[in-house]
Each structure stands twice: as C-alpha cells, then as structure tokens.
C-alpha cells in the first residue's frame, strides 16, 4: 500500500479517519501504531471480539511489538474499570438486563475522576477506536471524555453504520464529530486490487459509494466487465417465490466458480418482519437442497439460551416426578432444537413414539425408545446428551438450524464434564466463541449485520429493493471481491435513510 | 520510591497479631527491649516487598510454630513507582489516604487531593509456598498476584551483618540497584556488567597462557601432534561466558582486601552509605541494630545523617540511647513485648526521651526522687546479685534519677502512660509533694510510703536493729569527718539512750547530707538489706523494701 499517513493525522489530538470498506483501514491502524513512537502502549478499542482478534492478527503479522498496543472491546475496557470501582449492586449482574447500559452510564462519571485519568495516562499514550460508526451516542460521550486527556484517533465509515439501537442510538455523522478533525486520505480500493479479485468490481462499488454518500437513491445496472449482475425479477408472492427467486438463485450459485459465496437476506418489515433467523432457516431449505450452505447465526441469539434453559427445566421436572413418562416432551425439545417436522413426525406422533414394522426403522425406533426411557429413569445432562446425539446423528439433514443443535450438544458435553446446568454451559460456550471469534467462510447465508467486515469471492444480495437503509446496501455489496449479483424487483433503489 | 504507610502482621515469628500506621514518616526508629519483635517487624517488611520469590521460610517462622495459622503480612504503600499504576499492573487496585484512613470508595470525594496507596499481602500457609497479591477493599476485586520483578520496584533493602553480598554487584544487591538508577534509558545493568566481564577476558587473553599449566599444554601438544593434530595455538584463558563471572564476582575492595573482610563497624557504615544513596530516589532501607560495631559518636553521627534529607524511608531498630537522644520524638516508635501495635510519642515526651533515654529500653522503671534513692536501688541490684536472686536488668528494671523536685511525678506518669510498669521511690518529708503523690494513686503507680516527715535515711535510722546502726556510723565515706564521727560515737551508749541517739543521728544525717548521693545510697543498701530478716513484718522500712522487691521480681 502506497499511501503515506499524513503527519498531520498522526500528530492530531482528535482525528477521525473515514475509511471505506476494503481501503486499508486496518493496515493504516497498524502503521499508525508502528509510526507513533511512545513509551506507553496505544489503547485500541473496537466493538467485537472478532474485531479484536482480527486486529491482533494483523498487528503480529506486521511485526508490531506486543507492548506497543493493547486491544480490547469498548465494553470490555470500560467493564474492567467500572467493575473495579463500583459495587456489583450498582451495576447488576452480568447476565441481567441493563447491565451493559449501567456499566456505560457509570463509566461516564468514572472516567472524569482525576484518579482514573491518572491511571489511564499512566497506562496509555493514545486512543484508537475502530469501527467508530458502530459506537452508540453514549459510547461516543465516553470517547469524548477520554479524548480530553488522550490523543484520540477514530477510524470508521459512516456508510457502514448499520448498528442502531433504540435505547442508545448510534453516533451520527457529521453532527457528533465537531470536535474531531476529519481525514479521508484513503482513496484506493486495495481489496479489489490483490491477485484474483476484480479491480473493476472494486471501481464499481466505489462509484456506487460515491453516489450513496450524497444520495438516498441509486440506479443499478448490470456490468459484465465488472462481474456485476442485476437480476430484475417480478414482484414476489408466496405462490411464486420458488420460481421467481429460489430457482434462479440456485442457477446463479451453480454458475459461480467459487466455494466462497455469501447470500445476503436483508431484514425488512413486510407482512411482519422478514429476515429473522427462523425465516432464513426456512428460505435456506428452498434453495440449498444439497446442504452446502452455512446458516450464519447471531452469537447471542436468545433461542440458544432458551433452549438450554428449557432442557434444564425438563430435567428438573422429570427428576421431581419421575413416573410421568411422556415422549411428547422429548418431541417438543427436539422441535425447539430445530429438527424439522418431517424427521419428528417420522418417529413421534401426538401421543408419543410410533412403533415401526419395517426392520431397519424398528432398529432405530427401539434404540430411540431405549434412549428416551433411560432419560426418564435418570434425567440428567448425560442421558439427554446420549438421546440427542443419537437422534442428531441419524437426522443431520433435518435440522433447520444446524448451529443451534451443535451448540446445544456442545453445552451438554460441557455440562456433563463440569457438572453444571446446561444453561451455564451454554453461557460458557457462547463466551468462549465471543472471546475467540469464529470462522465464517465457504458458502454462507446471512444478513448484513452478521457478515459485516467479512469478505467473500461472490455475494448474492436478495430483496435489494426492500432494503430500507442505504448503509445496509453498501455493507452488502462491499463484501464482494470478485462477483456481485443483486436480485431486485426494480433497478431504481431508493432508501428511507 | 515507596513508603510503608501501614503494616499488619499475623502469626509471624514472635508476633501473633500486629498493626501499625506509620503515616508519612520517613525515618522510623523502632525501640524496645530485646525479643519484643522489632527485628521481626523489619523482616516482615522485607518479606512483603521481597524482590525474590524464594524467601526460604520454615515451620519455625510461624507464630508458636503453628503452621495451621497462615503467616500474613500486609503493607500499604504510598509514593510507589508510577509504572505500577497502569491498568495492566495494579492501577485498578488503587486506594486513597484520607484523614489518616485508607479508603477504597473515593468516587464521591475530591480525589485530586488524596494520596495514592497500594496494598500488598504476603501469605504463606503450611505448604510453605509464599504468595504475594495486591488487594484493595472494593468488594468486586479479586486480589491480583504481584511478580517478584514488580516487587523489586519498591526498592527494599535490609542491612544485616550476614549480607556480605551488599558489597558486590549481584543481581539483587543494592549496588546493582544503584547502577540501575544511574543507567541510561534502555541500558540494562546486566549489559554494563557484561562489559566488565569482557574486559577481564581481554586482559587475561593478552597475557597469553597461564604458566602454571604450561607443562600440561606442552604434553598435550606433543601427544596430539603424534596423532596428526596440530595445536600450535593451544593456550589457556578465562572462558568468556557471561554467567561464569557474574556481578557477584565484581566486588568492592579496600586496597587489595575485599570489603566484606573489613570490621563490623566499617562494613555497617559503608553499607548504610550505599543504602542511603538508594533512598535518594526513594526506597525503603531496613537497618537492624543500627549501633552494631559503632562507637557512641558514630552512632550519634549516623542517626543525624539518616534523619536528614530523606526522600525514601528508613526503618532502624536500636538499643542505643545515643540514637534515641538524636532522633526526634516523631521518629521513635516503641515496641513492647506481645504488643499488637507500636507506641508513638508526642512532643510532650521529647524532654524525657533526651534525659532518660536508657529507660525506654527497659520493661519496668523505678523513678528515684534523687541520688540517695538511685544509689539505694543500685544497692538493691548488688544485693540481688550477690545473694543469687537475679539482677535488675535481668528483671528488665531500670532505675532513673529524676533529679529532685517533683520532676519524678511527671516522669513516672509519662512512662506509665507508655505502658511501662513504674515504681516511685520517694521521701515523705515535703508537704507540697505529699499531695501530688495522690495523683500517682490515680494511675495505680506504687510508691514508697515512709512515715510522715520521713525520708529513706531517717526511716532506716529509725527501723534498723541497733547493731546495724553501729555499722552505719562506722562509715568510711569522706563526709564522715572526725567531727561527725565524734558526734556519732556509739561506743559508750546503753540501750536506754538508743532512741535519743537515733533521733540525733537522723537529724545529723539530714543536716550534713550524709547519704545524699549515689555512693551514700549504695552504702545504706549494703548495710541495711542483709539486716531486714531480723525485723518484724510490720516495720515500715521492711514493708517498703519488701513491696519494692516484690514489684521488681514480678
């Protein structure tokens, strides 16, 4: 990368670098860390553990000394301070509602204390905040406090600001940045210039970006040179969805000469909310018969915890009244773990287990009954694990949300090993994933929120005309490195925000 | 850097439980009788801030050798190196000092004016595996382990006679710490020492082989050449390996003699000089028995030297009254046996500290109104010794001369209030003083009770057996001049004249101040004490002396 970092930016005490996706923002952060020579480390904050992991990897790849920086999530950093000085009763327990908001509120009064300022100044020379567009107003308030005593550099892209929560809305550009000097010296879409990627597609996305920066509407047009295709289709109804959307989508996927494909389903409001996880699980089964796609899940989706909790309840219920053998309860749990009705109805009916005549089927149903009975005799994580594992291994293709089933199994395993409740085990499992990040690659089906920051050879965006926010549109298209295909009812897209 | 603000000790050696707040005092002189635990306090400080992990404790270091009760030493430090205040070190464990109290919750305070503090806990249980943690009193924070490297930043050094390594540049030596202080940024002590070792190598290399082993080399050369190996360059030299010659080999010498071979006093002085250099930039120096091997003038001098211009903190223990006289009251802390804290002094004590310094090292104090009394008490000491019943110092008793007037009242009260057992030996012949004696009763201070108008010698003259009177008048003290002797001639007296003579003798003794000095008092004791058995138990003199003897022994 050839752009030199302007001295003015390096030496600024309050700077905001606007860095479009794929323009070398992370590389710039690493270079800044290298170029700033200071005794104390630079504090680099971002939002997600995945972001922390990515930055760390880049730092060590570029050979930046470990003691020159410290990378953390914003909430991890402030929690460390707030929990050191406030009582638990001031902020509540970590799994309680409002915990993060409380911690953030307390941090606003904590970081203005001279003692805390002293500790921060002893600890760090600079503050960098990455993905700044994803900061909430309150987080921004905290950064403003820190910026009073630490030279502060913000990195982000307003056009990728897609996180927005009603209780604590995200920071708005440019109104919230009056105290920061804006920079935009990153002008070259490097990501598309490396070997194999499509420079022309990069240029196309840049062109669209420039339009979106000033407009809330855009007209999209196929461009073969740029490996960019707009599939304009008829309005979709429940009756024609297979023909109008899924079958053409299957054809496009087949045509693509890569294993790295991301299909994006935006979330929008139409006949109730669309694009939720159950919705996507259903859609996936209509275009991915071969089970080649991974359904990308939100790490903290509440059904994971609900499922774990419900297994605990069932175990407790059976332990307290052991004579009450009811196979339907097992069926309900399996349903919750997202086994499809086809697999469930094969072995269960409304009153319990179905007895099979077919020799092969009988072997299975006998074993299933054995597992169920074992569970009813001795209800515990281990017996449920055995039961679920048996059913899972024989119905792998009938799971709507494979990740959910996998995580439940993993939690059961952890609960057995460590003698905890399944719920606790799920919390541990999820924390582990959050800390260590997860790899999302290959063929994936997800939303912009879940795939932000990732790169795929090919991106197929569905329902483009239904997207309400141009930022979501930009995030979606800028994931593509080689091919971009957009399914839409209209080439003219207009966004509400 | 760093100062001990407060210290607490549990189950360590002779101390079951101990707490003391030293505040922001820089020069701390621990006084008290031997075995009271002064040295244990220094060792506790040395442990809790030890720069090494290997502190070599054994079962014997537990109080009462009871290993079921863990040893716990906690120190709260102020003025510590700033680098420890980062959030990845111990910044989030910061505490504050407010109005002499350590506080953990300062969110509602104006914290800019409060002093920063860090608390460190050393703990060792029956596993004998020591653990060091930084802790604070905020309920959510788990104590955080503190490494030996970080503890070394507190710069604690103990001056002890066995520590000859303080005269060489070993890893944890004060000299090497001094070198660190003078090193340029980024240059390590190890590097500089390595340079020295390189020089040694070069010097020996230039001189060729060592003659002493030349013969062997020649044989080797011949033998190997027969095997077809040519070793013309074979020679001996010091092998250059940075760990074969360490900082420990580079030591201070006085002329050609290693300094560690010097006399005790010289070693102590140089060692103190080295340590004081360290405290210039802050550090804690612990000196056990400051006076060891030093002459009185040097003790006085060194105390003055240490007292002045400190930016670090120095703890000394002493049994020397010279140190006591030289230090000011706020430097002094009294450790009493089995006490759970130290006694500090207020300005009121300054005079007594200067006039009666020795008394502070005793357990019990006899306040003598004047010289006769002091002499008499010394006589008691001799009597105890010659009759094999112990000695005053064996019982921890020290007599002080309050030099007349009613000064003894104030001194007695002072010592009593400090927790000493006090006995007052006083006459009963001054009316003004008689009333003041009542105030001693209020503090339960026992005192001699002679008959009204009586004093030691008059009570003796009144109560001793007749044959003893004869001994008293046959005194060969200088003041028993012929004139006096003539007046006290008892050779012709018969028993009917006894009481008349005793009165005359008493008057004369007072008039001529026959026993009003230390030798006089000693003489009285020497003559009178062996005669006590002959007296009845309710005789005033015997009652008084027996009460005093009982007090001394118990």
Image (tube, coloured by chain):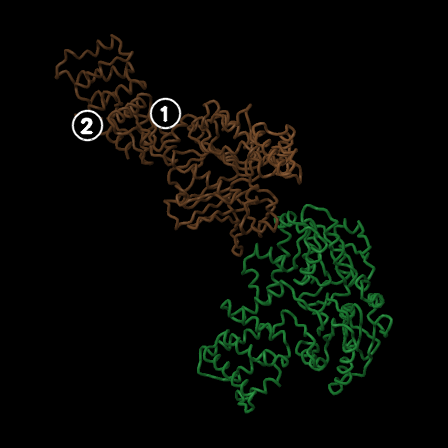
Mark 2 nearby-residue class (10 Å; few <14, some 14–19, many ≥20): some
Q: Give the camera-side residue of B484 and B146.
A: B146
Can you identify the residue that label 1 sits on?
Answer: B402
Which residue sits furthest bottom? Answer: A357
Q: Chain of mark 1?
A: B
Q: Colour of chain A?
A: green
Q: Give the camera-side residue of B210 and B263.
A: B210
| Earlier sequence position, callout 2 versus callout 1 | 1
Which residue sits furthest top? Answer: B482
Which chain does the brown colour mark?
B
Quadrant of the drawing holding the C terminus of chain B:
top left
Where in the figure is residue A185, as x and y percent of width and height?
A: 82, 56
Identify the image quadrant of residue A198.
bottom right
Can you identify the residue that label 2 sits on?
Answer: B539
Q: Chain of mark 2?
A: B
Say if residue B330 shows up in the picture.
no
Where in the figure is residue B499, as x and y percent of width and height?
A: 17, 18
Where in the figure is residue A33, as x and y percent of width and height?
A: 72, 52
Judged left or right of residue A459, residue A95 is left
Q: Residue at x 62, y 66 (%)?
A: A433
- Structural distance between the alpha carbons of marks 2 and 1: 27 Å
């Amino acid at each position: 990368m050839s752009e030199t970092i302007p001295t003015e930016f390096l030496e600024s005490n309050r700077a905001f670098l606007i860095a479009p996706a794929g323009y070398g923002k992370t590389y710039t952060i690493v270079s800044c860390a290298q170029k700033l020579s200071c005794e104390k480390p630079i504090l680099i904050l971002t939002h997600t553990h995945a972001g922390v992991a990515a930055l760390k990897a880049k730092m060590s790849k570029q050979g930046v000394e470990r003691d020159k920086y410290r990378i953390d999530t914003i909430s991890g950093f402030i929690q460390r301070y707030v929990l050191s000085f406030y009582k638990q009763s001031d902020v509540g327990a970590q799994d309680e509602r409002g915990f993060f908001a409380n911690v953030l509120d307390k941090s606003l009064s904590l970081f203005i204390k001279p003692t805390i300022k002293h500790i921060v100044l002893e600890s760090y020379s600079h503050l960098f905040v990455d993905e700044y567009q994803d900061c909430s107003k309150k987080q921004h308030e905290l950064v403003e406090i820190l910026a009073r005593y630490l030279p502060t550099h913000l990195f982000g892209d307003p056009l990728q600001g897609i996180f927005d929560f009603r209780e604590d809305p995200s920071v708005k550009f440019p109104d919230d940045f009056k105290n920061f000097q804006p920079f935009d010296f990153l002008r070259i879409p490097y990501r598309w210039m490396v070997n194999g990627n499509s420079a022309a597609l990069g240029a196309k996305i840049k062109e669209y970006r420039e339009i979106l920066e000033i407009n809330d509407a855009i007209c999209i047009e196929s461009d073969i040179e740029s490996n960019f295709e707009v599939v304009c289709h008829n309005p979709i109804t429940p009756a024609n969805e297979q023909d109008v959307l899924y079958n053409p989508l299957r054809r496009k996927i087949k045509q693509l000469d890569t294993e790295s494909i991301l299909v994006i389903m935006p979330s929008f409001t139409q006949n109730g909310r669309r694009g939720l996880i159950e919705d996507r699980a259903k859609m996936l089964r209509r275009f991915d018969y071969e089970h080649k796609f991974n359904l990308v899940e939100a790490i903290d989706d509440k059904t994971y915890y609900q499922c774990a909790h419900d297994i605990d309840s069932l175990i407790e219920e059976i332990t307290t009244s052991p004579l009450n053998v009811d196979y339907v309860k097992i069926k309900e749990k399996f349903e919750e773990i997202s086994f499809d009705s086809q697999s469930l109805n094969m072995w269960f009916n409304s009153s319990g287990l179905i007895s099979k005549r077919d020799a092969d089927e009988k072997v299975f149903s006998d074993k299933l009954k054995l597992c169920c009975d074992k569970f009813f005799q001795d209800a515990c994580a281990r017996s449920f694990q055995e039961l679920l594992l048996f059913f899972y291994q024989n119905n792998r293709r009938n799971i709507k949300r494979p990740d959910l089933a996998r995580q439940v199994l993993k939690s059961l395993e952890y609960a057995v090993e460590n003698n905890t409740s399944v719920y606790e085990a799920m919390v541990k499992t999820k924390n582990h994933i959050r800390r260590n990040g997860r790899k999302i690659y290959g063929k994936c089906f997800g939303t912009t929120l879940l795939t932000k920051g990732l790169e795929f050879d090919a991106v197929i965006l569905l329902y483009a005309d239904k997207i309400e926010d141009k930022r979501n549109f930009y995030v979606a298209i800028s994931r593509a490195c080689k091919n971009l295909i957009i399914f839409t009812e209209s080439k003219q897209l207009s966004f509400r925000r | 850097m760093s100062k001990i603000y407060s210290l607490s000790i549990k189950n360590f050696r002779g101390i079951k439980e101990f707490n003391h707040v030293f505040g922001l005092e820089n020069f701390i002189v621990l006084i008290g009788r031997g075995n009271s635990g002064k040295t244990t306090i220094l060792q506790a400080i040395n442990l809790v801030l030890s720069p090494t992990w290997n502190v070599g404790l054994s079962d014997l270091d537990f109080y009462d050798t009871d290993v079921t009760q863990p040893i716990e030493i906690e120190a709260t430090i102020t003025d510590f190196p700033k680098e420890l205040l980062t959030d990845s070190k111990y910044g989030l464990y910061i505490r504050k000092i407010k109005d002499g109290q350590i506080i953990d919750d300062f969110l509602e305070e104006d914290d800019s004016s409060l002093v920063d503090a860090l608390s460190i806990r050393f703990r060792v249980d029956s596993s004998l595996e020591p653990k060091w943690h930084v802790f604070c009193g905020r309920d959510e924070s788990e104590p955080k382990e503190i490494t030996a490297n970080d503890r070394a930043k507190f710069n604690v050094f103990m001056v002890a006679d066995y520590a000859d390594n303080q005269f060489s540049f070993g890893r944890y030596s004060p000299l090497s710490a001094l070198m660190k202080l003078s090193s340029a940024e980024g240059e390590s002590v190890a590097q500089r020492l390595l340079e020295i070792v390189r020089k040694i190598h070069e010097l020996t290399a230039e001189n060729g082989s060592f003659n002493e082993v030349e013969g062997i080399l020649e044989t080797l050369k011949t033998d190997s050449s027969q095997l077809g190996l040519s070793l013309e360059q074979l020679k001996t030299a010091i092998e250059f390996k940075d760990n074969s010659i360490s900082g420990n080999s580079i030591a201070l010498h006085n002329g050609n003699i290693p300094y560690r071979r010097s006399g005790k006093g010289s070693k102590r002085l140089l060692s103190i000089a080295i340590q004081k250099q360290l405290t210039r930039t802050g550090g804690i120096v612990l000196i056990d028995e400051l006076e060891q091997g030093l002459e009185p003038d040097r003790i006085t001098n060194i105390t003055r030297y240490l007292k002045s211009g400190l930016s670090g903190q120095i703890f000394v223990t002493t049994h020397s009254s010279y140190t006591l006289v030289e230090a000011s009251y706020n430097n002094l802390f009294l450790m009493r046996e089995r006490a759970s804290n130290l006694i500090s002094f207020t300005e009121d004590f300054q005079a007594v500290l200067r006039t009666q310094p020795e008394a502070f090292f005793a357990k019990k104090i006899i306040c003598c109104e004047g010289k006769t009394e002091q002499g008499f008490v010394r006589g008691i000491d001799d009597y105890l010794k010659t009759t094999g019943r112990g000695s005053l110092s064996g019982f921890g008793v020290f007599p002080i001369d309050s030099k007349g007037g009613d000064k003894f009242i104030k001194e007695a009260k002072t010592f009593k209030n400090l927790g000493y057992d006090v006995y007052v030996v006083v006459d009963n012949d001054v009316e003004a003083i008689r009333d003041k004696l009542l105030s001693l009763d209020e503090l339960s201070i026992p005192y001699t009770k002679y008959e009204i108008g009586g004093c030691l010698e008059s009570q003796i003259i009144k109560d001793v057996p007749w044959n003893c009177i004869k001994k008293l008048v046959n005194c060969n003290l200088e003041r028993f001049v012929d004139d006096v002797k003539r007046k006290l001639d008892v050779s012709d007296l018969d028993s009917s004249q006894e009481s008349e003579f005793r009165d005359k003798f008493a008057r004369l003794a007072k008039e001529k101040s026959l026993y009003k000095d230390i030798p006089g008092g000693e003489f009285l004791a020497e003559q009178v004490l062996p005669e006590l058995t002959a007296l009845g138990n309710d005789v005033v003199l015997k009652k008084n002396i027996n009460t005093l003897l009982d007090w001394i022994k118990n």
